Image (cartoon, grey):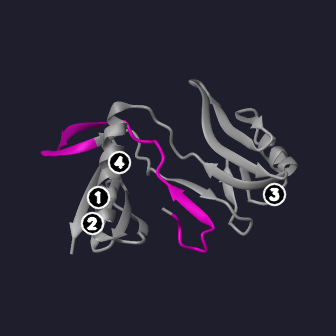
Amino acid sequence: MRADRGSRCSLRPATAGVMAQIQTIGGEQMWIVSLLLVVIAASCSLADAEPMSIACASLSPGASAESVRNLILGCGSSTELREDTANSWRIGQRTPNGWKPIGQLEFKNGRLLRLTRTWANVQDKSAHAVTSTLLSLLSSLAGESKATGVLVSVSTLRNPGGDVNILQLYIGKRLVTVYVSQPEGAGPAVQIDETAD
């Protein structure tokens, strides 16, 4: 799916997910999760695209390879740059569990052509199940509605017992809402609803 703003950027589903299990809280069964990750990787490919931050560096397509290298290397010892070829680089972070990929860079003629920030890369069966369910729902709705675009809304509901982050995806006449919360005294929770008008 491509973003509509002058085809500057594209949005692609990414492999990601959450650690999840079902528990009963207050008499209701809920998905309890250690982390919710919206499964999208954003890539911008033209020089007029807005900067994107990867690690501590703010990068823009069109920047020289040397300036990109200097920005990434200036992020400190926990950030690692792997130059696989002159035109393909990977950025990662060193963690106690090893190297964690956080971005990819593509160059052409010594200039940054495209950058991709990896928001999540989780390998877990429960996480895969939750993420696959969300992707199947969105894919089905997009096919049913013949929608050519998706309207995205993100908000936060402030509650004394804990904030609720809300992601709403409007696809045709359907609405998919993802609620992410961490109530006091309970673990993080996520709920996914589909609404038809």
- What segment carries the magenta color? 2-31
Residue 55 falls in image quadrant: top right
The quarter of the picture where residue 82 lies is top right
Mark toward the viewer: 4 or 2: 2
Q: Which residue is mark 4?
A: 182
Q: Earlier in the sequence, mark 3 or mark 2?
A: 3
Q: Secondary structure at mark 2?
A: helix
Secondary element under disc 1, as helix, strand or loop, is helix
Residue at disc 3, secondary structure: loop
56 sits left or right of 131 in the view = right
In the shown orientation, is residue 46 left or right of residue 38?
A: right
The residue identified by callout 3 is 63
- Callout 3: 10 Å neighbours few (<14), some, many (20+)? some
Vertical comparison of 178 with 37: above or below: below
Label 1 or label 3, whichever lies nearer to me, is 1
- Residue at the (44%, 51%) spot, across then down: 38
- Read off the residue under disc 1: 140
